[in-house]
Amino acid sequence: MPTLPTTTLPPLPSIPNLPQPSIPSFPWPGALPPLPTMPGLPTLPSVPRATLPPLPSIPSIPTIQPTIPSIPFLSPLPSPSTP
C-alpha cells in the first residue's frame, strides 16, 4: 500500500493584545445624610375575647367482648378389640 504524503499546516496568526478599558473613578461626596426615622405605629385597642361554653360530654359506648363458645371435644368410640 503506498504511503500518503503528509501536509503541514500554516502557523496560526497571533491574537493581538487588546487595550484594557480604564474605569473612571467617581468622587464620593462624603458622609451620607441620615435616613429619616419611621413614625411609630398607633396602638390598637384591645378586643374583648369571646368565651365559649364547654362542650357537652359524649357518653362512652360500652365495649362488647366477643366470646367464642367452646366446642366440646368428642372422643372416638372405643374400637372393638379383636380376639
Image (cartoon, rainbow, N blue to C red):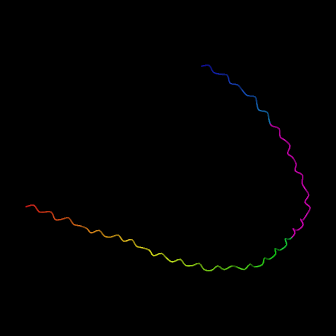
The answer to which image quadrant residue 55 occupies is: bottom right
Query: Percent position (x, y) of residue 79?
Result: 15, 63
> Is-magenta flag for residue 29?
yes
Q: Residue at x 39, y 71 (%)?
A: 66
> Is-magenta flag for residue 11?
no
The answer to which image quadrant residue 2 occupies is: top right
Q: Which residues are magenta?
A: 15-36
Q: What is the chief secondary structure element of the magenta stretch?
A: loop
Query: Percent position (x, y) of residue 45?
Result: 78, 78
6 or 78: nearer the viewer: 78
Q: Residue at x 57, y 79 (%)?
A: 56
The answer to which image quadrant residue 57 occupies is: bottom right
Q: Is residue 19 left or right of residue 48?
A: right
Q: Residue at x 83, y 38 (%)?
A: 16
Query: Percent position (x, y) of residue 81?
Result: 11, 62
Residue that lies at the very extreme toward the top in this rendered image: 2
Q: Is residue 6 left or right of residue 21?
A: left
Q: The N terminus lies in which quarter of the figure?
A: top right
47 or 11: nearer the viewer: 47
- Above/below status of 4 relative to 20: above
